[in-house]
Amino acid sequence: MGTNEKAAPARRPRDSAATKELLLDAATTEFADFGLAGARIDRIAERAGANKRLLYVYFGDKDQLFEAVLQRQISKLARETPLVEGDLVAYAAARFDFMLAHPETARLAAWIRFERRDHWSQKEVDSYQTKVETVAAAQRDGRLCDDIPAVDLFAMVLRLTESWLDAPPALAATTGTDPFSARRLAEHRAALLDAVRRIAAPAPPTSRTTQTCHEGHKACPSQPGT
């Protein structure tokens, strides 16, 4: 090599996994703020501090990037809010805490309902199906009330976990305090878990004094002296 020649600077190897995560983080924020239609690839790349070309290399196009964001959110939610043995109270607590810590999840769900109501992924369906089956199994075992279909019981609990976080601002104002203060959130969380506990509790065992009456009904209590 001549004395006037300079060695080319060594290229720093690109960490593709880290770049993908940065792009997904930026895309999550962008889609949560603007939805699929309103999101802009330029803004996502700028948020991530990455070359826009890499977004197309890693994810294809905006629709595919949106799908990747959704799949990551579904996986994160499923991992951090497990439904173990049909314990809906513990599930409600975990989901409330998750949604409070990750408000972008609720905003993404709202955009999906608005922009893509007839579109869903099989991974999301499978995630819900597993939980509904877990509720149904707990109902059969007598650990949850069985007078409400499993899918409806789970749907009610699901919405309860967001009831305050998604409450109309005018309703939140009726408390006369900061609706998201630590104290207010703790009060609502306790009320939420109590409500889920009451809704999901199995019916008490039939009284031993109950017997079948002459018409075949089982709700007729036996009379004293009979």
Image (spheres, rainbow, N blue to C red):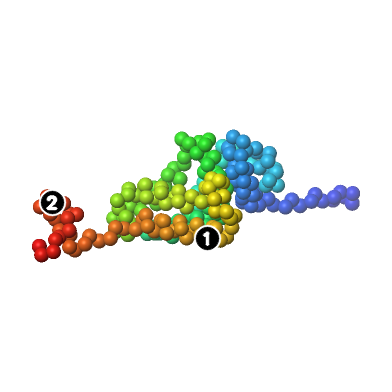
Q: Position of residue 58 (x, y in %)?
A: 61, 43
Instruction: Mark 2 or mark 1: name the one nearer the start of the chain.
Output: 1
Determine whether the residue tagged by mark 2 lies in a helix, strand or loop.
Answer: loop
User: Residue 129 vs residue 11: left or right?
Assistant: left
Residue 110: in sight, yes or no?
yes
The residue tagged 1 is 186
How far from the left and from the top, in percent, is residue 26?
Answer: 64, 46
- Residue at image location 52% in from the left, 55% down from the top: 98
Amino acid on which disc 1 is placed: Ala
Q: Is residue 64 above or below residue 194?
A: above
In the rendered structure, the answer to whether residue 151 lies left or right of residue 2 reads: left
Tell me the residue that label 2 is attached to.
Answer: 216
Kindly state the secondary structure of the residue where label 1 is placed.
helix
Q: Which mark is residue 96?
A: none
Say what amino acid the circle numbered 2 marks. Gly
Question: Can residue 57 be seen by looking at this rendering?
Answer: no
Q: Alpha-carbon distance for marks 2 and 1?
A: 49 Å
- Is the residue 158 above or below the residue 183 in the image? above
Which quarter of the rendered picture does the C terminus lie within? bottom left
